[in-house]
Amino acid sequence: MAKTIITAALTGAVTPAGYKIPETPQQIADEAYDAWKLGAAVVHLHMRADDGLGAMDKEKFRETIKLIRSHKDCDVIINCTSSGASPEHPATDDERMAHHRELSGIEMGSYDAGSFNWMPGGVFVNSPQFLEKLGDLYMEKGIKPELEIFDAGMLGVASYFVKKGHLSTPCHYQFCLGVLGGMPATVENLLYLVQHIPAGSTWSAFSVGKGHLPILFASLALGGHIRVGMEDNVVYEVKENGEKVMATNHMLVERAVNAVKAFGNTPATPDEARRMLGIPAFDGGRVRAALGID
């Protein structure tokens, strides 16, 4: 059976308060461990400041990674954002990269391949200068870039940095659909993106909001991988009477696992995902030693 990589994006920078979103390092680590036990091969991490708002806090990344790796049986792939700031906690380009530069245990990192108007909040800035430095840092540290594509033009940006030697290949693309300011979450748009990436690439997709399930099922049908979690969706389902059932990360990952199996695939283990993505094999003892974990 084909293997499908499930990524669990547990908490975002701008996901609104009032839902069951993990915010502290302990809460995020606990939900990462739970997602891995359910069948997620990758956990995508954002941090929250003490006021609950998104922040690029290197020390909170450090604490969260250590807590995840304190589970000696847990070999989940740790994927850390490079774009987790909020208006209340802005970050410089250097602060967006500090954890990737200085911390051990990070195997993947997000690479948002362009800037756009993220409506209605403001401009999501990823300058060419930042992307060049970020790509170089990932190559230096052996971190696998996750090329986050919000619109078709970002494919050209990614290709430019590949040609200039600032991104390694084969690339892994994460199609981020349904954000107002980016591409709408339609199967037609997903198919376009899939058809315009280089041969030999891997890809995953998700949608925020109501397009979540159509994009999940279309990704499976097109041979891609999937991302779920409360960074992207806080509603699990809407009943016939209009009542909303609020989500948890556990519910979203569990449904994704069931969908993969119903399709006839098998959720990839972290080791299988590493081989598929070209990430070096996991050495838990070495990683824990580097993190100062007994």
Image (cartoon, rainbow, N blue to C red):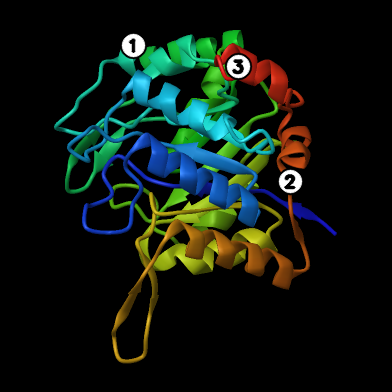
Is residue 155 positioned above or below 194 on the image? above
Residue at image mark 2: 269
Residue at image mark 1: 94
**Label 3 packing within 10 angstroms: few (<14), some (14-19), many (20+):** few
Residue 109 drawn at (x, y percent)? 51, 27
Residue at 56% from the left image edge and 26% from the top image edge: 159
Question: Is 241 or 165 nearer to us in this picture?
Answer: 241
Give how far apart the Cα atoms at labels 3 and 2 are: 32 Å
Residue at 59% from the left image edge and 56% from the top image edge: 191
Instruction: Locate the N terminus by quadrant.
Output: bottom right
The residue most toward the bottom is 241
Does the residue at mark 3 contact the one at mark 2 (Cβ under 8 Å)?
no
Residue at 26% from the left image edge and 44% from the top image edge: 14
Q: Earlier in the sequence, mark 1 or mark 3?
A: 1
- Closer to the observer: label 3 or label 2? 2
Question: Is 201 or 277 nearer to us in this picture?
Answer: 277
Instruction: Locate the C terminus by quadrant.
Output: top right
The residue most toward the right is 1
For residue 163, the mark is 3
Give how far apart the Cα atoms at labels 1 and 2 are: 33 Å
Q: Amino acid at mark 2?
A: Thr
Q: Amino acid at mark 1?
A: Asp
